[in-house]
């Protein structure tokens, strides 16, 4: 995975939208926005309980999925980055944006054209003799519009910022897809472990049913007890089938993520016992630098500001320079003769006076777009901070839940061991032993489910952090955006 795309930094002391933004390359007034500020906290609230897990700081942050030590996950993450259709769509949008940058840049360059024509004309207005004739022309023309007040520069700057936003969006899409792959693979490993436990549980319920039926034949229990035991077997079978269905759904989702048909994609059953890694969160300002969605929204805000500047510059005069030269003749043989040459140069200064309110409406729309982009940027910053806090809170809760469920599973296992000892001594029935074992298996399954939720939440935290935790290459963010030139 490539290093995060960070074309421009974010102010450390606050998202002062409208105060720190300015239009590079525009000599006109800088458009303002009514958006407020976002106070960036100094630190997150990391769960202290997670410090017991091994830190992932030593792992390569670019290939963050390697912290789970799953070779299949490593392969699928790379395949998804190369073949996922959403990534392909984002790459195509980036190509479109870069083409628009080239188109905007071409408007600032001199335009040169060549022409050749032939026509037949007649009548007294064309020929004093009243007849008709053929006119052949050959010429070249050149034109250039001087960007006196930065309107074209602002349009080109906006297009370049849109391309930077598209590049950040591509990186964000790749991160989202790889995060989904990691969550699906980890969920699949957890379901495989659950299926193994469920098979043991089903075997225990079937053994319990056989003992109950034997006791009924001996007169020890009645028909209701057999019915309850048979219902337990049917319920366990239904749960096993539900796990099979859920595994197939996750497998099909993985096939879509890596760009393959579900019918040709399959993963072998496998469980995982990798210890849950602890992901260092860093500080909020560093996270905002890594977040692709924040970067993309920031560039869209800058592009909206550039377009607002271009809309204001539309009120200023424009200067166009033209030059032309060529030859004309009624005979093809004389077309290149020196006496048939003609040339001309010109300059046109245009100042808008009345346009029925069209330019003012365009300026108002550009200003509204700027205010909208500023609000979206501010909201995206708040959402990014909330996203990290949500995942930290989820991991803290799941950590406590996992510890409680682990104790429950250990106690259930001990209870089953004690019941087995009592059963060997003749102090407990076989049915009691099976019941204790079923309870131990159920507690262990619940523990597996909590651990699976922890791994999924860990991936969600990595995604919320921008796909990494190594800030050595992160740009400093305690600076404003470029000032007006």
Image (cartoon, rainbow, N blue to C red):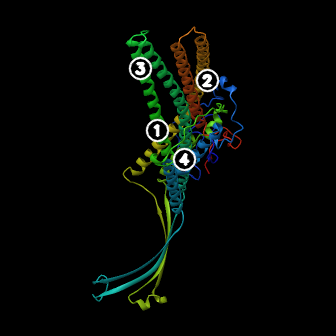
The residue tagged 3 is 230
Badge 1 element:
helix
Badge 3 element:
helix
The residue tagged 4 is 80
Residue at left 54%, top 47%?
80
Q: Earlier in the sequence, mark 3 or mark 4?
A: 4
- Distance between the Cα atoms at labels 3 and 4? 45 Å
Left or right position of 221 against 301:
left
For disc 4, the neighbor class at 10 Å (few under 14, some 14 to 19, many from 20) is: many
Pinpoint residue 68: horizontal percent, then vertical percent. 63, 37
Q: Quadrant of residue 119?
A: bottom left
Badge 2 element:
helix
Q: Earlier in the sequence, mark 3 or mark 1?
A: 3
- Distance between the Cα atoms at labels 3 and 1? 27 Å
- Distance between the Cα atoms at labels 4 and 1? 19 Å
Q: Earlier in the sequence, mark 2 or mark 1?
A: 1
Residue at left 41%, top 20%?
230
Which residue is more in the foreground, 478 or 30?
478
Which residue is more in the foreground, 246 or 115?
246
- Distance between the Cα atoms at labels 2 and 1? 28 Å
Name the mark on residue 248.
Answer: 1
Residue 234 shows in this picture: yes
Mark nearer the viewer, 4 or 1:
1
The residue tagged 2 is 399
């Amino acid at each position: 995975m490539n290093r995060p795309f960070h074309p421009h930094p974010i102010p450390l002391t606050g998202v002062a939208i409208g105060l720190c933004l300015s239009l590079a390359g525009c000599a006109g007034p800088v458009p303002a926005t009514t958006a407020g500020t976002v106070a960036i906290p100094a630190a997150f609230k990391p769960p202290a309980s997670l410090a017991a897990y091994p830190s992932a700081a030593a792992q390569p942050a670019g290939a963050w999925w390697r912290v789970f030590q799953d070779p299949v996950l490593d392969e699928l993450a790379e395949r998804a980055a190369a073949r996922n259709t959403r990534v392909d769509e984002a790459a195509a949008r980036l190509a479109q944006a870069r083409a628009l940058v080239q188109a905007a840049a071409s408007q600032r360059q001199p335009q040169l054209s060549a022409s050749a024509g032939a026509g037949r004309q007649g009548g007294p207005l064309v020929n004093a003799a009243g007849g008709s004739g053929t006119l052949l022309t050959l010429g070249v023309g050149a034109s250039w519009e001087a960007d006196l007040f930065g309107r074209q520069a602002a349009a080109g700057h906006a297009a370049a910022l849109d391309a930077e936003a598209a590049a950040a969006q591509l990186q964000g899409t790749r991160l989202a897809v790889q995060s989904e792959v990691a969550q699906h693979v980890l969920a699949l490993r957890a379901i495989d472990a659950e299926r193994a436990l469920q098979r043991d549980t089903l075997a225990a319920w079937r053994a319990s049913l056989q003992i109950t039926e034997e006791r009924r034949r001996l007169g020890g229990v009645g028909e209701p007890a057999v019915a309850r035991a048979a219902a337990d077997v049917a319920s366990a079978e239904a749960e096993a089938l539900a796990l099979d269905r859920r595994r197939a759904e996750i497998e099909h989702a993985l096939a879509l993520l890596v760009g393959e048909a579900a019918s040709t994609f399959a993963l072998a059953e496998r469980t995982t016992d990798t210890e849950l890694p602890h992901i260092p969160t860093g500080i909020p300002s560093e996270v905002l630098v890594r977040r692709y969605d924040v970067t993309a929204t920031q560039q869209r805000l800058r592009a909206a500001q550039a377009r607002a500047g271009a809309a204001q510059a539309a009120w200023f005069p424009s200067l166009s320079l033209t030059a032309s030269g060529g030859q004309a003749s009624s005979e093809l043989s004389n077309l290149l003769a020196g006496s048939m040459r003609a040339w001309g140069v010109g300059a046109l200064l245009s100042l808008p006076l009345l346009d029925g309110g069209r330019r003012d409406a365009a300026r108002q729309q550009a200003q509204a777009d700027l205010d909208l982009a500023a609000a979206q940027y501010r909201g995206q910053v708040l959402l990014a901070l909330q996203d990290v806090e949500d995942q930290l809170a989820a991991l803290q809760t799941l950590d406590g839940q996992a510890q409680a469920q682990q104790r429950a599973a250990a106690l259930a296992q001990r209870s089953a061991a004690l019941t087995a000892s009592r059963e060997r001594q003749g102090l407990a029935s076989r049915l009691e032993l099976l019941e204790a074992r079923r309870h131990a298996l159920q507690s262990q399954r619940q523990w597996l489910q909590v651990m699976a939720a922890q791994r999924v939440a860990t991936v969600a935290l990595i995604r919320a952090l921008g796909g990494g935790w190594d800030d050595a290459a992160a740009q400093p963010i305690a600076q404003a955006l470029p000032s007006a030139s």
